[in-house]
């Protein structure tokens, strides 16, 4: 059985366009026709399906709670765990450098491949097939979610911390945007009056980079307590 058929069996989906599956499992270190664009698409499809599932499952939860629940599900750590469950690392096409450094075990590469796989299924079979795949792999995590236990995101925590003490709110500034339009990295600096240094964060979105900054500031503030 070739690798494509093995993966199709693992994910319980047979591709009409096998080239989409091949692209989804090709890291940028291996070829120019790689999974970056599919990852970009898969990220959006995943967000839509999970958002819809949460909207239906928790009709009494507000936007903030739903956003935090979604973030807890679609974060890179969760995606890499799901990829490991499927043994995707055994089938990712990597360049020699990444292969030698153990890239098939790297969490970011596994998470990206999982999102790319979602994008490939969406293009090949449509939204319903992508939804079927996503919900089948997130079902246990969705069932175990509790809106009462979800943590507030770092930006919200920092804002509430400062407001409770009558302190000025933080200022965030995007200082650079790196990479191609479909694979951008945002670099953000943030500062609060009570921390005498500029804190930097980076991520795929401005929001994620700002969350990193807020999380670091919170750590510094709590260390000083």
Image: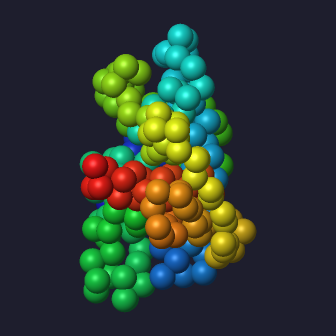
Residue placed most toward the observer, 79 or 193: 193
Which residue in the rendered view is the most extreme toward the bottom?
97
Residue 114 seen by the camera: no
Residue 25 at what x, y percent from top left? 46, 65
- Looking at the image, which is closer to me, 83 or 199? 199
The residue depicted at 57 percent of the width and 20 percent of the height is 62
In the rendered image, residue 153, in percent from the top left (x then y), is placed at 46, 40
Residue at the (60%, 81%) spot, across then down:
32
Residue under the point 33% across and 25% down: 149
Q: Quadrant of residue 90?
A: bottom left
- Dividing the picture into quarters, in which one does residue 190 lie? bottom right
- Tell me which residue sits at (34%, 63%) in the image: 107
Q: Position of residue 123 (x, y in %)?
A: 65, 49
* Residue 80 drawn above or below residue 32: above
x then y, percent, for residue 69: 45, 31
Q: Is residue 169 left or right of residue 2?
A: right
Which of the two residues, 171 or 84, is positioned nearer the viewer here?
Answer: 171
Residue furthest toward the top? 60
Position of residue 76 relative to residue 102, above or below, is: above
Report the quarter where the N terminus lies.
bottom left
Q: Given the current orientation, which residue lies at the most extreme right position?
A: 181
Q: In this view of the protein, can residue 159 be seen by the observer?
A: yes
């Amino acid at each position: 059985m070739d690798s494509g058929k093995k993966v199709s069996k693992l994910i319980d989906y047979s591709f009409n366009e096998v080239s989409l599956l091949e692209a989804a499992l090709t890291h940028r270190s291996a070829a120019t026709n790689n999974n970056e664009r599919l990852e970009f698409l898969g990220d959006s499809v995943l967000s839509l399906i999970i958002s819809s599932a949460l909207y239906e499952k928790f009709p009494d939860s507000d936007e903030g709670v739903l956003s935090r629940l979604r973030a807890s599900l679609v974060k890179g750590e969760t995606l890499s765990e799901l990829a490991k469950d499927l043994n995707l690392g055994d089938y990712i096409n990597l360049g020699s450098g990444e292969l030698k450094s153990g890239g098939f075990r790297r969490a970011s590469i596994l998470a990206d491949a999982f999102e790319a796989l979602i994008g490939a299924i969406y293009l090949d079979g449509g939204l319903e097939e992508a939804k079927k795949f996503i919900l089948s792999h997130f079902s246990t995590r969705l069932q175990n979610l509790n809106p009462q236990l979800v943590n507030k995101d770092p930006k919200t925590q920092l804002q509430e911390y400062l407001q409770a003490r009558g302190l000025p709110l933080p200022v965030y500034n995007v200082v650079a945007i790196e990479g191609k339009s479909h694979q951008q990295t945002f670099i953000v600096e943030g500062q609060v009056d009570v921390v005498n240094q500029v804190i930097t964060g980076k991520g795929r979105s401005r929001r994620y980079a700002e969350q990193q900054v807020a999380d670091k500031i919170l750590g510094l503030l709590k260390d000083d307590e």
